[in-house]
Amino acid sequence: MGVTDDMEIVGLEDDYNTLKDGTKDGFELHLRNLVNGAYGVEFATNNLTVKFPVIDEVEFCVVDIKQGIKPLYSTMTDKNGQKSSKFYVRSGNSSPEMPLTEVASYISSRFN
């Protein structure tokens, strides 16, 4: 966060300005609350490291996520308000949704 897809460091000022508490602490609290809500406090506590390095006087955010020890699902809401669980995997520099027909086999080989 604070870095473009072209690796240009733009900083977090615009992000800070969207928050009631427009500070680094407020930003990290908001980020952790989002992760806690989506994946649980246990995951956020044990698998997430948030750092705020500064390069050329511009602060940005680096989030390190440890490899999980159990599968996590993302809950998505469609345009009709229907919720469904999705399972995504990391494949190179993308995170495609895994087809339901492949999830059980993947989980069995990856987490057991």
Image (cartoon, helix red, strand yellow):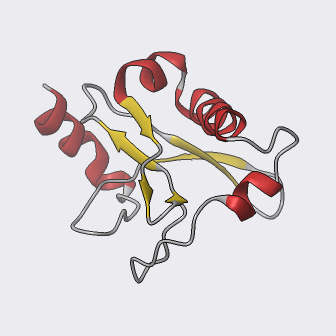
Relative vertical location of residue 99 with respect to residue 61 in this rendering, above or below: below
Is 41 in front, or is 12? 12
Residue 111: % across, % down: 18, 29
Query: Splitting the image into 4 quarters, where does residue 29 fall?
Result: top right
Q: Is residue 81 left or right of residue 73?
A: right
Q: Residue at x 58, y 64 (%)?
A: 11
Relative vertical location of residue 46 with respect to residue 38 in this rendering, above or below: above
Is 69 in front, or is 61? 61
Q: Residue at x 47, y 45 (%)?
A: 52
Query: Splitting the image into 4 quarters, where does residue 68 fall?
Result: top left
Relative vertical location of residue 85 with respect to residue 10 in this rendering, above or below: above
Q: Is residue 54 left or right of residue 21?
A: left
Which residue is the extreme one toward the front?
A: 57
Which residue is the extreme one toward the bottom?
A: 6
Which residue is the extreme one toward the right?
A: 20
Q: Is residue 109 left or right of residue 103?
A: left
Q: Is residue 88 left or right of residue 83?
A: left
User: How many numbered marks, from 0 up?
Assistant: 0
Is 38 in front, or is 79? 38
Q: Residue at x 64, y 40 (%)?
A: 24
Q: Residue at x 48, y 71 (%)?
A: 9
Residue 67: % across, % down: 24, 36
Q: Quadrant of the C terminus?
A: top left
